[in-house]
Image: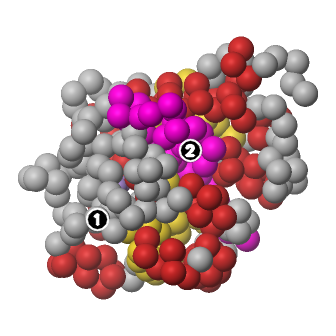
Amino acid sequence: MAATPTFAVPSSFLGILRLESEASFHVAGIPLDIGTTNRSGSRFGPAAIRHASRMLVDGDHPHWWIDPAGLPVADIGDFAIALGDIENSLALIEAQAAEYSHLIALGGEHTISLPLLRALSGRIGEPLALVHFDAHVDTWPDNFGQTYAHGSVFFHAIEEGLINPARSVQIGIRSPVQKDVYEWTLDKGVTIITAQDVHESGPQNVAQRVTGIVGDAPAYLSFDIDCLDPAFAPGTGTPEIGGLASWQAQAILRRLDALAFSGMDVVEVAPAYDTAEITALAAATMAWEYLAMVGKQAG
Ligand code: MN
Ligand code: MN
């Protein structure tokens, strides 16, 4: 057993206090939420996720048999943003992210993925494969007239050549959406696996499809917590019913270890709408799942 009870562990991610830049994995909070189209408040997401993550420090991951807190991972605190200014915030986030080779970002809303993808694809020198869990396609060309906001992240990522649509897959999709936006996404070559597809075909089948689509390309995982059903993640800005159970997301993630992941984010946790920390704990657990998997891969 850990020497410190979980509730007394410091409120960093998994209680990690190391700040050294030579760590292999870096956890950063990104408290940007001004690109939210509905309920705001995910600026408080990083703190809530870190706080909830302390439940995960009293043993090994029971599938990978590795303790993510024991990996060479540093919690580097929160990135600076430009208060009230989305475009300057994106520029700041990109510049800070460019310093790190393998970043695990705690949102904030989904707009943060755009500068993270700009930084990572720039660093790697080619478009990334994308594994995107979400209730929403996030490929709207704009959000109520706003060019950069959380519903347009992957529209811009595709238009800027940051991701390779043929190696990109969205999982859990189910929100209302204009048919032309949905079809634009498919026409670009993105694979959409709806929430209903997940329920009816099962996580094993979904993971197999994702693995086939992504192949050996350098990959990025973007986990919008609203891919989960509001029963499992009520604390979010744009909830949609009919979503994944948290176990389904875990069962898919644990089967993606053949992929060459280079970074991940978990976004859209808005603690003010949460109940008993279940959304924050779900988000912390997805980051922990990811760390355990890539830590195991790193050997
Ligand atoms: Mn999203
Ligand atoms: Mn969403």
Question: Do we see residue 170 in this rendering?
Answer: no
- In the rendered image, which quarter is residue 15 located in? top right
- Range shown magenta: 258-287
Is residue 265 shown left or right of residue 4?
A: left
Write down the residue under mark 2: 282
The x and y percentages for residue 168 are 47, 73
Compared with residue 19, is residue 121 higher up or lower down, i.e. above or below? below
Question: Do we see residue 11 in this rendering?
Answer: yes
Quadrant of picture, ligand 2: bottom left
Is residue 271 on the magenta stretch? Answer: yes
- Number of marks in the image? 2
Name the quarter where the N terminus is drawn. Answer: top right
Between residues 246 and 140, which one lies in front from this camera angle?
246
Is residue 228 shown left or right of residue 69?
A: left
Q: Residue at x 40, y 43 (%)?
A: 234
Q: Is mark 1 within 8 Å of ligand 2?
A: yes
Write down the residue under mark 1: 175
- In the rendered image, which quarter is residue 288 located in? top right
Binning the other alpha carbons within 10 Å of mark 1 as few (below 14), some (14 to 19) or many (20 upward) gives some
